Image (spheres, rainbow, N blue to C red):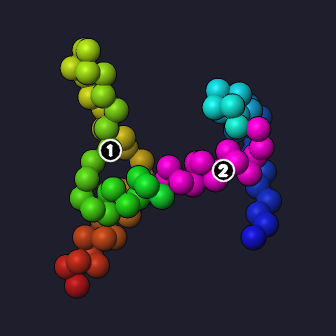
């Protein structure tokens, strides 16, 4: 499948920054990694799990909030109730 996407200056800058930070050399690899992470996160939310980032030294935890993930979780609950 071929997809063409346009990004504004901020989006393009973020993509380049992510490529540099992760050592990913191609846009294809960057987006494949991003899709793999999103797919995993959707599966976790569909299973009723929350996704957290933890700083164990400080005992600080943050739950990931993302509308697409919440939609997947709610959609799964609706399907289960039907």
Closer-to-camera residue (73/24): 24
Q: Position of residue 15 (x, y in %)?
A: 70, 37
Task: Name the side, left or right, on which 9 lies relative to 81.
Answer: right
The image quarter in which residue 56 lies: top left
Q: Position of residue 39 (x, y in %)?
A: 48, 58
Disc ID at residue 26: none
Residue 60 lies, in percent from the top left, at 25, 22
Q: Which residue is mark 2?
A: 31
Question: Residue tagged by mark 1?
Answer: 51
**Looking at the image, residue 81 lies above or below residue 21:** below
Density class for disc 2 (Cα within 10 Å; few <14, some 14-19, many ≥20) is: some
User: Callout 1: helix, strand or loop?
Assistant: loop
Residue at x 34%, y 70% (from the top left corner): 75
- The kind of secondary structure the magenta stretch mainly shows is helix
Residue 34 belongs to magenta span: yes
Image: magenta residue range: 25-38
Q: CA distance from mark 2 to mark 1?
A: 21 Å
Q: Is residue 73 visible?
A: no
């Amino acid at each position: 499948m071929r997809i063409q996407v346009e990004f504004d200056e901020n989006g393009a800058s973020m993509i380049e920054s992510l490529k540099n930070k992760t050592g990913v050399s191609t846009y294809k690899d960057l987006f494949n990694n991003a899709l793999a992470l999103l797919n995993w996160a959707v599966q976790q939310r569909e299973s009723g799990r929350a996704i957290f980032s933890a700083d164990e030294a400080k005992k600080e935890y943050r739950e990931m909030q993302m509308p697409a993930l919440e939609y997947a979780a709610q959609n799964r609950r609706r399907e289960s109730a039907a």
